[in-house]
Amino acid sequence: MDNGRRRDGCPDPDNNGLVLAKNISKTHISNESRVEILRDVELELAAGETVAIVGASGIGKSTLLQILGTLDRPDSGTMWFRGRNIFRLDPLQLARFRNTSIGFVFQFHHLLPEFSAVENTMMPALINGLPPGKARELAEAILVRVGLKHRLNYRVTRLSGGEQQRVALARALVMKPPLLLADEPTGNLDQKNSEQVHSMLMELNQELDMTMVVVTHNMTLASFMTRRITIMDGALTDAN
């Protein structure tokens, strides 16, 4: 081993490495035109660190986030998660990995309107095969933590926008994943609710020791992160 890396290039488990993405490339083809979105991108994420991906719309921020979350596959390149080559997993293995290892929060909360806050939050635990009682216990605990103790059984359509986004955050964290990916998590909120979500994200990062990658246009949120990067001509670069 050299500098905490094995000969195959993936992070050594004892080197605090969570994710290593190497030579990630992605091209979109539309109307017979080819647009190179990502070009040989390399990104390493340490356990517990926070990263903001900033910059103008259309530069590939969300594409990179989707690849990191295994919702999309690169045209080429490799990604290791705790030393495991993720894109070698079959679809069922990948779905199980995603359910337990990655939490997702989006600009639009994508909650199920016919269900309550606790029922929405339970979903990842139920999908993982936990008994309903245990799933509910975990869901209630994280909802209390995000300040929704008195909204557990409310249908999400009765909640405010800020409360709905906190339910979405609770759902993302109910399985205590080591990686949280957020795409414009405060883009649909007013300033007061945005600030509350900002504070909550940073507090939960510390409490759960989770790695967090956030795509955002909100430079206040980005300023809280330990690292800020952007994409220029398909490659990653430090943001000013």
Image (tube, grey):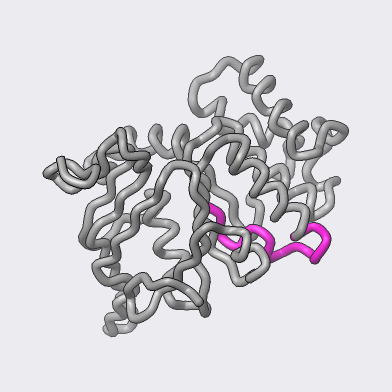
Reply above or below: 70 against 153: below
Residue occupying the point 80% across, 57% down: 193
Residues 124 and 59: in front is 59
- The location of residue 229, given as percent across then percent down, is 45, 68
Q: Is residue 103 above or below residue 75?
A: above
The residue lying at 70 percent from left, 55 percent from top is 198
Assess whether residue 205 is covered by the magenta stretch.
Answer: no
Residue at coordinates 71% horizontally, 64% vertically from top-left?
Answer: 188
Residue sitting nearer the eye, 240 or 103: 240
Residue 121 in percent (x, y) is at 66, 34
Magenta span includes 191: yes
171 or 153, which lies in front? 171
Outermost residue toward the front?
3
Would you place residue 117 above or below residue 27 in this image? above
Residue 22 placed where, x, y %? Answer: 25, 57
Question: Residue at the spot x=57%, y=58% of the render?
Answer: 225
Name the image quarter holding the N terminus: top left
What x and y, as percent, mark residue 127? 51, 28
Residue range in magenta is 181-194
Count how many numbered circles sit on residues in the image: 0
